[in-house]
Image: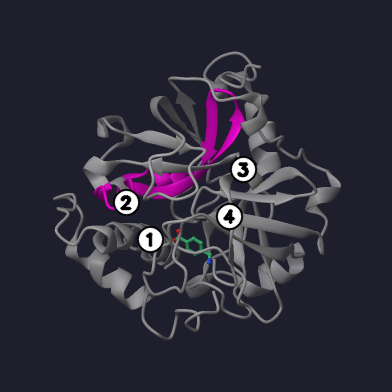
Amino acid sequence: MRRSFVRALVRPLVLAAAATALPLLSMSPTSPTSSTTGALSALSPASAAPAGSVVIGSFPIDVSESPWTVALSSRDRFGGTRAGQFCGGVVIGRTTVLTAAHCMGEDVLGTSAKSVRDLKVISNRTDLLSNRGQEIPVRAVRVNPDYDSSSNAEDFALLTLAVSLPQSSVIEMAASGDPAYKPGTSAMVSGWGDLTGGGDYAHSLRATRLHVLSDARCQEAYPGGAEGVYVARSMLCAGEAGGGHDACQGDSGGPLVAKGKLIGLVSWGSGCGRAGSPGVYTRVSEVVRARHLDAWAGGPRGTGGGA
Ligand code: 4AZ
């Protein structure tokens, strides 16, 4: 089933990150044991990328090369080993961070986003083991009301920060029709996620390069059923023919950038770095569209994105 498929990939593996970081971390009492089982099966050797190949196919970067890439953190929920990092995010306004809706879900947090009191955005920190950069409390969370957790369609949420970031950290979002979405375009994804598909979480920021794929290729990879379904309207997919270059668990919500603009947010996929199973990203032009609908933005257009 699609629902359990997405959950098997998304929820348990993010929780697996926490378990790796802090084995004694007490998971939400509401997290069913079956989710852990799902995590283990999703992390089985058959679905994991070959060791060393995978953020995945990646290289270390300094956050100054990608200052819009931020870590989402809750030490309460995920332990302090890696500063509580559990997802990525992208600075799209001086007080606005875009992330995946599923990162704000109970499946990931083990509770509602509202009750995570120490939810923070960590900016300008390359290495999660350092105390560089800034830890900024999140003042408000707005999950896209059109997010469909069963298919992962429309997977985005906006976080409002308590303190402004410099304009130099802000990346422009690519609107619909931007050439950056053209299949074959070279793109880069960055994050602190799993390096191998086996629960080996990075503490220092990494990136990998890949190419935007055509909707036809994405649909072929994810026609529905066990592998999930690709919904072209709100998703795009990216990868390399032989696999090996991909985002992975813990990278969710982080940026896919092409031609200097934000085109995607890490969302889901079947395993990590597998040939024929490209990573699936939230199509950022959908965010641009939704933000023009004042009703969803929770206020006037561009709320939180103030210069
Ligand atoms: C995840 O669970 C996830 N290989 C992120 C990215 C991909 C798969 C799963 C793509 O957060």
Q: Secondary structure at mark 1?
A: helix
* Disc 3 residue lies near ligand 1 with CB under 8 A: no
Mark closer to the chain start, 4 or 1:
1
Q: Where is mark 4, residue-wise?
A: 190
Amino acid type assigned to the residue bearing label 1 in the image: Arg
Q: Amino acid at mark 3?
A: Ser
Residue drawn at x 45%, y 79% is 48
Mark 4 / mark 3, whichever is N-terminal? 3
In space, the residues marked 4 and 3 are separated at their CA atoms by 12 Å
Q: Along the line of sight, which residue is nearer the eye, 3 or 84?
A: 84
Task: Specify whether residue 219 is painted magenta.
Answer: no
Seen in the picture, residue 94 relative to 270 is either above or below; the reply is above
Q: What secondary structure is marked by label 2?
A: helix
Answer whether residue 91 is magenta in the image: yes
Q: Nearer the viewer, mark 4 or mark 2?
A: 4
- The answer to which image quadrant residue 134 occupies is top left
Residue carrying label 2: 107
Which residue is identified by label 3? Answer: 64
Q: Which residues are magenta?
A: 78-106
Q: Establish if 192 lies above or below 289.
A: below
Marking on residue 178? none
Tag 4: residue type?
Ser
Q: Is residue 239 visible?
A: yes
Query: What residue sits right under mark 1 in the picture?
Result: 7
> For residue 301, which quarter of the picture?
top right
Q: Which residue of the protein is positioned furthest toward the top in this rendering?
A: 300
Nearest-to-viewer mark from 4 and 1: 4
Whether tag 4 and tag 2 are in contact, CB under 8 A, the answer is no
Mark 4 neighbour class, 10 Å CA radius: few under 14, some 14 to 19, many 20 or more: many
